[in-house]
Image: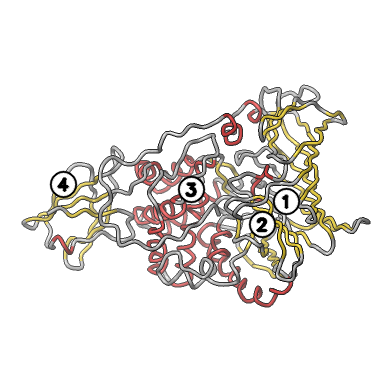
Amino acid sequence: MYRYRLIAPATPLLLLLLGEPGLAQQTTYTRADTLRGSYATPGRAFWDVTFYDLKVRINPADSSIRGANTIAYRVIGPGSEMQVDLMTPLEVDSMVQRGTRLEYRRDGNAFFVKPAAVVQTGESGSLTVYYHGKPRAAARPPWEGGFTWGADSLHRDWVVTSDQGVGASIWWPNKDTQADEPDSMRVAITVPKPMIDVSNGRLRKTTENRDGTTTYEWFVTQPINNYAIAVNAGSYAHYSDTFQGEGGRLSLDFHPLSYHLDVARRQWAQVKPMLACFEHWFGPYPWYEDGYKLIETSHLGMEHQSAVAYGNGFQNGYRGRDLSSSGYGARWDFIIVHESAHEWWGNSITTRDIADMWVHEGFANYSEGLYTECLFGKEAGAAYTVGSRYNAEGIRPIVTSYGVNANPPIDQYYKAGNMLHLIRQIVNDDEKWRGILRGLNTTFRHQTVTGKQIEDYISTRSGTDLSKVFDQYLRTTEIPVLNIRIANDTLSYRWQSTVPGFAMPVRVTVGAGAWAVLKPSSRWQRMAVAIPADQFKVDPNWFVALLREP
């Protein structure tokens, strides 16, 4: 999840503004933007995170936290000063390595520290950062995240975190980039009794402390992106189940608030068919070792790895609405489906730079249509996906500036998802397309990637150079316009408003009940047809606009 905004469905796309494809507006970025968004800065490039050992004590009484994170790392190149990220107003108390307190300096939300001893390439070290303060409260969770300090309807404390986009360093010190994930992680959260904390991975230990608090120690055995680490502390009930999937027996754990136990059992029964569908299309659930959890939260939802956050009110649709206006989106629970899809797209396959977040959100959006297809058939799935495209804005290109943590536009969902649906039509072989989706999750399993790697893989496996398709839909604001004229039983056609060299095939009507695949370019081409101009149509599965000339 990044953000959602419901836009009323538009009339069918017949004509867009013509001209050159839209380009990104020039934006000025600061040093702070680069420190936050780049993974190739001197303070980050020379070391690789291998393990985080995070311990945080949460005090709902005054909305404060106190904790420590031990960062284990391996040196992969020359460097002298480590960058550790922690956002204001949180304060670092000390940084300790090998029992020695180190000197450090602060530059906004980044701290710089020199290791206590020179470590050679290939060697390992660790640094413990002690910190405290009142973290920023989430302004509009989960989109503008942080800590959400609240209470349930029985006035019991309910504290949850969400930090995608804003960054995990809003509440804990780490190397705050998607490009570097620890190989595993321990998360120990201490909360006042009788609160229960549910975080990522599996619960290894519960400790009742003498001061009236409880420490819940969770362990993640697999790589995890830092924004997926979450606190969910409240008055939770718990029930469990199992799913027999491609990877064997998968544990399912469900944590609704105590008074929602019965309704959760009914609504969350959708998890099993969803997992079966996604395993069919994408391959095994990526985290059998850490299990699958669904946790009720006070915000709408988030793809916290192996601990999916849910706040959709135990209803189908997106807060009860169908984002596609097709009728199908109101027949399943949007948050269960979309956020769980991120276990494959975003959590297992993670982009190194936020500019390529279409890989997370575009595939998750496309997954909604695939789930609709699993439930109601291929035509229903297509209707859902096509219906969702009218939420696209076309204001900014999807792929934004690299290295600066610039949030992509809402089109990373709907336009990118429809692009993937379009590519399926170009491939024109469902089993081959399914093999591409499963192959992505095999080839890039538990890895950080660039968007270009994903694009190249799809082109290679499809046997078609799709580079111009990706450039058009990801790097311009426009969709292609098929410009046609029909006169004297002759169809003239060409692509307009496209990137140079764009020659995507398109399926159209060429006669009564007859379809054909055209291969337009930017030059006019002609063919004989037996159809009047007003009956010429483009297959709606192609995300293009149609311009009929007199």
Disc 4: which residue: 525
Quadrant of image for the N terminus: bottom right
Q: Looking at the image, is mark 4 or mark 3 earlier in the sequence?
A: 3
Query: Which of marks 2 and 4 precedes in the sequence?
Result: 2
The x and y percentages for residue 467 are 37, 41
* Mark 3 closeness class: few <14, some 14–19, many ≥20 residues within 10 Å: many
Q: Give the quarter of the image for residue 92.
A: top right
Label 4 – label 3 distance at C-alpha: 34 Å
N-term-proximal mark, 3 vs 2: 2
Q: Is 344 above or below relative to 398?
A: below
Instruction: Point out the residue furthest to the left here.
Output: 488
Residue 443 screen position, x and y as percent: 54, 46
Q: In the picture provided, is 405 more to the left or to the right than 156?
A: left
Q: Kindly report the distance in space between the C-alpha atoms of the residues bearing marks 1 and 3.
A: 26 Å
Q: Residue at x 85, y 30 (%)?
A: 98
Q: Amino acid at mark 2?
A: Ser
